[in-house]
Image (tube, rainbow, N blue to C red):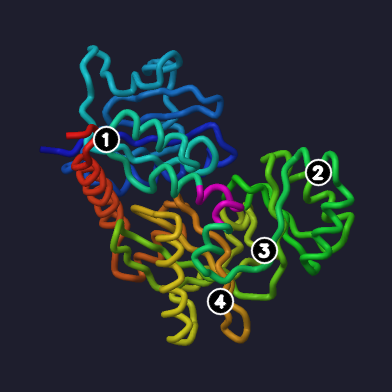
Amino acid sequence: MKKRIGLLYGGKSAEHEVSLSTARAVTGALNFEEYEVYPIFITPEGEWRRGELLKKPASTIEELQFGDDVTILENNITDFLIDNNGKAIQFDVIFPLLHGTNGEDGTVQGLLEVLNLPYVGNGVLASSAGMDKVIMKQLFEIAGLPQVPYTYFIRSDWANEQEAIIARCEEKLDWPMFVKPANLGSSVGINKATNRDELVKAIEIALQYDRKIVVEQGIVAREVELAVLGNDFPEVSVPGEIKPVTEFYDYDSKYKDGSTALIIPAELPVNTVSGLQDLAKRAFKAIDGSGLVRADFFVTADNSIYINEVNTMPGFTPVSMYPLLWQHTNVSYPELIDRLITLAIERFEEKQQLHYKKD
């Protein structure tokens, strides 16, 4: 029998458009002879809508946003489990293709856990830790992973202790500094600061996206990424290097202007590659990852390695770094999707063996 897949995408997030591109790409790679595919769209306002069973890949993003003749699930989002005839839809797995807040951060994962549904990707802990750059960095520190210096604060600290925060940044870090919202991806809200005025401006911009802000030491280094796939015994891809034309790998260079060169595999010494692969695996385990993670690193001229971050739901179109890394490691895009679905079901079945009451 065909496996019944619920594609969950869109979302109330600054990365809503990225999610739509991912969903369209995944529908193009799924084998409709093996899967029944139900589209579940979350609008930018947070309204849930379930479309009819897909018969073929979506040819445009607009197809995945539906019209007015769909089931609108505004009162009870769990209605996506019920078909239009009032019968339960027995999903074999939910495939969350949500990037950023309200999707990649553990919130939707928590809902799916409570509903006892198998789902692709990282669980609640890994998703939330992977979204919050401060918690992530603290876990990496405990795991002994090398990182660039950083500091952080919250909105109320900035409102009451602005001069003290600037002084702390200058004491702990050297110019340039990078200012980031702690809970966002796709380089949204990130800016480089080379002096106090730019630092203040960058912080004010970042505070539009999150209440917690990270300020990191700038570093002259190559940006190298690796893909991790698996559950308890993860595999790691070849490394790929990002060479943006802009000063850093921002939102536009990732998704809009096509100005960034992706070099796969990255030209690195064998020992550096093995070191990166080991650190990627350790980072995956540090957050208790499952399914997929993209691990991002800095590599300096003397081949010193610093972990930047992990992304628990990386860009997932065929031209995104995560699938491209696996393509160059002999795993095709359709095969990658199949493996992620299998990993999700395996993890769910393992959880069903747990005892929830005392014998």
> Which residue occupies the extreme left position in the image?
1
Q: Quadrant of the N terminus?
A: top left
Q: Quadrant of residue 217?
A: bottom right
Q: Position of residue 306 (x, y in %)?
A: 58, 72
For the residues carrying marks 2 and 4, which lies nearer the camera in this image? Answer: 2
In the image: residue 98, left or right of residue 14: left
Q: CA separation, marks 1 and 3?
A: 38 Å
Q: Quadrant of the C terminus?
A: top left
Q: Which residue is mark 3?
A: 248
Q: Earlier in the sequence, mark 2 or mark 3?
A: 2
Q: Which residue is mark 1?
A: 37
Q: CA separation, marks 2 and 4?
A: 32 Å
Q: Position of residue 50 (x, y in %)?
A: 36, 24
Q: Is residue 43 above or below residue 299?
A: above
Q: Which residue is mark 4?
A: 305
Secondary structure at numbered mark 1: strand
Q: Earlier in the sequence, mark 1 or mark 4?
A: 1
The crowding category of the residue bearing disc 1, from other C-alpha atoms within 10 Å (few below 14, some 14 to 19, many at least 20), is many
For the residues carrying marks 1 and 4, which lies nearer the camera in this image? Answer: 4
Please give the range of residues in magenta.
129-136
Q: Position of residue 32 (x, y in %)?
A: 21, 41
Q: Amino acid at mark 3?
A: Phe
User: Is residue 190 something that shows in the picture?
Assistant: no
Q: Which residue is drawn at the image coordinates 55% and 42% (left, top)? A: 15
Say if mark 2 contacts mark 3, CB within 8 Å.
Answer: no
Q: Amino acid at mark 4?
A: Ile
